Image (tube, grey):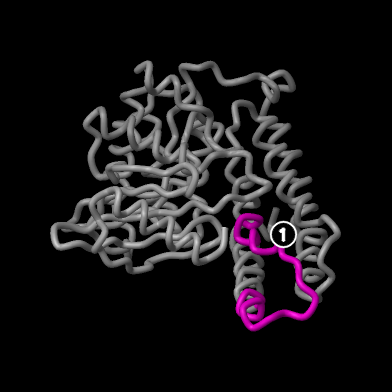
Amino acid sequence: MRVGEAEAGIRRFLTNQGLADATLRRVQTGRNNKVWVIESSQERRVLKQYRRLSADVRDRLATEYRFLELLNANGIERVPEPIADDRDLNLALYSFLPGTPIGEVTRDHIHQSVEFVGQVNGLRAYPSALAIPVAAEACFSVRDHLDSVRTRVARLLTPGVATPLHEEARALARVRFVPALDGIEAAVRAGFDNGDLEKPLVRDDRILSPSDFGFHNALESEGVLQFLDFEYAGWDDPAKLVCDFVCQPDHPLDLELAKLFVKMICTALDSTGIAERVELLLPLHRLKWCCIIMNEFRGMEWSQPSSTEAVEVDVMRSQLLKASAYFDEHLAQT
């Protein structure tokens, strides 16, 4: 869709919602979506346009909208309220949540996060919750965890764009990520009986996961956390949620807070063997986050960069350095 057509579509959508005279203020744009704050004389709302990615089989809009419908219908607060959507334009309108990004993470933030996950999973037996699909890259066996990370590493090794920066990224994956993954997989295999590698989690041990859950997707207003972004939500292994929460690089947890989160989430979810699986799988998910940091290197193609692409090159260089530093901090001894 051309830019003019997209803008006209957005205006039609807002007019249909009684927001013809509202102003739009862009607050986010990224590889996955664009976000605006919509300001009218009565209130503020949030408009989100989800990017369609050819390699992504998930419907991000439907996933997030449906998940938020479930939470709002059952009285779970501190999340946006879904107001309207347009599947053709990939647009969704949500209520506005006040707050600012979280600074230093505290024990109270951990308590509130665990409380939220517990509230969400209080809905596990509801028919509307059972109808929610699996989460993005859901893992229901140890084998799933291993395969998911090996696939991510393999993508970074795939021949493609031949810029020096891409070659440097592939070298990082080949020289450091692959040996680390081999060592981690050997340790994981040693920690589980062979039959347990393939054994799926029973339904009672699966959780309704917000996915991509962490303080990077939260705001704080007068001491209360508000939670955002549920494009990847669905049924999953609680150990994956815990590992991702602890590993997220933009709001790293110190050892004390990480242990507190694990202890509290095990109690809140009452799910078998979470702590043991987290201990064995955490290095694997550390490596996964090295790959996630380098997502910018997937699908980029150019010969001579334009001015816009030159900016992306700077971003990619920064992410490459960040991934290398994250590896050094958490996995260099693996």
**Residue 236: horizontal and vertical position, in percent?**
52, 30
Q: Is the residue 311 above or below the residue 328 in the image?
A: below
Q: Amino acid at mark 1?
A: Gly
- Inspect the magenta stretch and tell me whether residue 309 lies in it: yes
Residue on which the image places disc 1: 299
- Which corner quadrant holds the N terminus? bottom right
Please report the residue visible at 60 percent of the width from the left and 53 percent of the height from the top: 289
Q: Is the residue 41 above or below the residue 240 in the image?
A: below
Please report the residue visible at 63 percent of the width from the left and 39 percent of the height from the top: 57
**Residue 221: horizontal and vertical position, in percent?**
20, 57
Q: Quadrant of residue 10?
A: bottom left
- Inspect the magenta stretch and tell me whether residue 142 lies in it: no
Q: Is the residue 36 above or below the residue 313 in the image?
A: above
**Residue 232: horizontal and vertical position, in percent?**
50, 41
Direction bottom: furthest residue: 307
Please report the residue visible at 21 percent of the width from the left and 31 percent of the height from the top: 75
Give the class, few, some or many, for how many residues have Cα within 10 Å of label 1's Cα (few <14, many ≥20).
few
Q: Which residues are magenta?
A: 290-313
Q: Is the residue 94 above or below the residue 263 in the image?
A: below
